[in-house]
Image: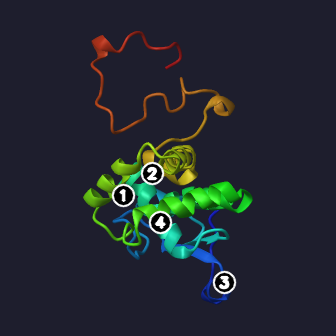
Amino acid sequence: MDQLVTLNRRELLKTTSGLLTGCVVAGSPLALRCVVAGSPLALIAPGRVWAVDLTALTSSEGAALVSMARTIAPHDKLDDAAYALVIQAVDGDARKDANTRKLVKEGLAALGADFAGSPESERVEALKKIESSAFFQTMRLKTLQVLYSSSIAYAYFGYEGEAFSKGGYLFRGFNDLRWLPEVPAEDSGPLPTGA
């Protein structure tokens, strides 16, 4: 499951750095949840509980960044584990670069300590006020890059991955998206040979 780590209780208690944790399921953000049968994430997750070890950021900073990433790219039923991968990438950047660490910490301070617990409408307003800042643009870019390239998001959106190595899309998966309306035959064009 990308770079999420499964932990048992004993390993979790031994951790001294920041840690983001949660249970795997599609549901409401930042709530402790259990696996729901039929969740696409449940099919690819190695376990019910996930954790991301943070080295440059604290757990509360990580939670605030998860809320920020969720506000930037809101998908109500996409599990927090997908957003945690974004925060893991930001933490890695902050660990390697003092300027990035300073940017993130100052940006979070500007948002305020209660940002993560604020209603979505308040988070949106807070982010609108800083959307031209380097902090917001850095988080926006990292959110889009990491969130939509994770196997968790692929499973959630029904993306089966690249098709070149599997012979392409023409005969495999070209028209299997169930959320799109059917196109009338007269508007669909010619069918490929062998279909």
Disc ID at residue 77: 1
Tell me the residue at 63%/62% (across/down): 91
| Label 2, label 3: how far apart the Cα atoms are | 32 Å
Asked whether the residues under the numbered discs 2 and 1 touch, taking CB atoms below 8 Å apart as contact, a structural biologist would say: yes
Rendered view: 132 above or below 20? above
Q: Between marks 2 and 1, how big is the CA–CA gap?
A: 9 Å
Badge 4 is on which residue? Answer: 109
x and y, in percent, of residue 21 in the image: 53, 74
Task: State how far apart marks 4 and 1 are (Cα).
Answer: 28 Å
Q: Which mark is residue 156?
A: 2
* Amino acid type for the residue under numbered disc 4: Ala
For the residues marked 1 and 3, what is the alpha-carbon distance in whole angstroms?
Answer: 30 Å
Identify the secondary structure beneath mark 3: loop
Does residue 7 sit above or below 64 in this rendering? below
The image quarter containing residue 104 is bottom right
**Does 2 sit left or right of 113 as displayed?**
right
Residue depicted at x 47% and y 69% = 63
Task: Using the rendered view, name the quadrant where residue 166 is placed.
Answer: top right
Answer few, some or many: residues within 10 Å of disc 2's Cα (few below 14, many 20 plus, some between 14 and 19).
Answer: some
Question: Label 3 belongs to which residue?
Answer: 16
Which residue occupies 49% across, 59% down? 107
